[in-house]
Image (cartoon, rainbow, N blue to C red):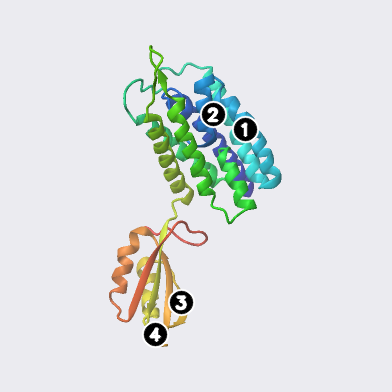
Amino acid sequence: MKKFKNISAYFFIILAAILLAFTYQLFIVKNNFAPAGINGIATMIQYKTGFSIGYMSLLINVPLCVIAYFFVNRDFAKKSLLFCLVYSFAYLGLGQLDFSAFQYDAGNHDTIYPVIISGTLGGLVYGICARHNASTGGTDIVSKYISVKKPYLNFFWITLTLNAIVAVASFFVYAKADAQGSTSYDYKPVCLCIIYCFISTFLGNIILQGSKQAYKFTVITTHADEISKEVLTTLRHGATKLTAVGAYKQEEKDVLICVVNKHQIVDFQNILKKYDNTFSFVENVGNTFGNFAKVKK
């Protein structure tokens, strides 16, 4: 079973790398905006110099993956290297083909369709890689290294800073000169870069959290046995019972902790309404592990 999971992980990483290569060829390079991270820098370099994103990815990411192998995590490094190699060669290979009939070229039209599509696909790729202990290279590897070596640092700000640099740089990189030699600057590439970062990060986080989102109820009550029995029979979920002492009256009460599916929130609240001397609060659970059935009702 473990061997099958490892094989499937590599399979999904390869598919994600090919998908990202298609995304760049079809929706990004023709529409004059830079996406997030190191690939955004590589996109601007290709726009100004013609030096391919595929080669730039190899030059940057292969050394980073080697560093990650020795100083971060070997499994993470190998999977990230696989992604970067497949992505780079897929991008270079696709560049030799004629995709003009399929490429989204907005031309002079003021539209955000390319960034919506590419951001959505990019978020899908990031989520797949993160779920299989891999990355798309670049800042992802740097962030992983920082989180291992200096876990007290918030690498969110490092990623945000780099993306901000990409967004600001795109304002100058994609400036155009007219026939008289004067330069015309446009905020559109900056806005598109910000939108891409938001969409890809938002969707990537959703995929990383998975489909096992739930809600945790903490219930302080004098009717713990009755509530837990009704939760078990009605919602088909168990509960953990604890004993606590209130700080104000120093009275002993029971505390129930129960995790239920999202569609069962109202049902759980209706159960609690039947009992007096009951107080509860609910928290969002990003993911669940172990024996938690997705009960359909």
- The reply, left or right, for residue 262 in relation to residue 148 is left
Of label 4 and label 1, which has the lower sequence position?
Answer: 1
Amino acid at dot 1:
Ile
Whether residues under marks 4 and 1 lie with C-beta atoms below 8 angstroms apart, the answer is: no
Amino acid at dot 3:
Lys
Query: Circle 2 — which element?
Result: helix
Of label 4 and label 3, which has the lower sequence position?
Answer: 3
| Residue at position x 52%, y 23% in the image | 46
Amino acid at dot 4:
Tyr
Of label 1 and label 2, which has the lower sequence position?
Answer: 2
Check disc 1 and report the residue beneath it: 60
Query: Circle 1 — which element?
Result: helix
Whether residues under marks 4 and 3 lie with C-beta atoms below 8 angstroms apart, the answer is: no
Q: Residues within 10 Å of mark 1 (few under 14, many from 20)?
A: some
CA gap, disc 2 to disc 3? 55 Å
Q: Nearer the viewer, mark 2 or mark 3?
A: 2
Amino acid at dot 2:
Ala
Whether residues under marks 3 and 1 lie with C-beta atoms below 8 angstroms apart, the answer is: no
Residue 218, x across and y down, in percent? 41, 71
Check disc 2 and report the residue beneath it: 42
Check disc 4 and report the residue beneath it: 248
Of label 2 and label 3, which has the lower sequence position?
Answer: 2
- The reply, left or right, for residue 91 in relation to residue 67 is left
Whether residues under marks 4 and 2 lie with C-beta atoms below 8 angstroms apart, the answer is: no
| Residue at position x 59%, y 47% in the image | 144
Check disc 3 and report the residue beneath it: 241
Whether residues under marks 1 and 2 lie with C-beta atoms below 8 angstroms apart, the answer is: yes
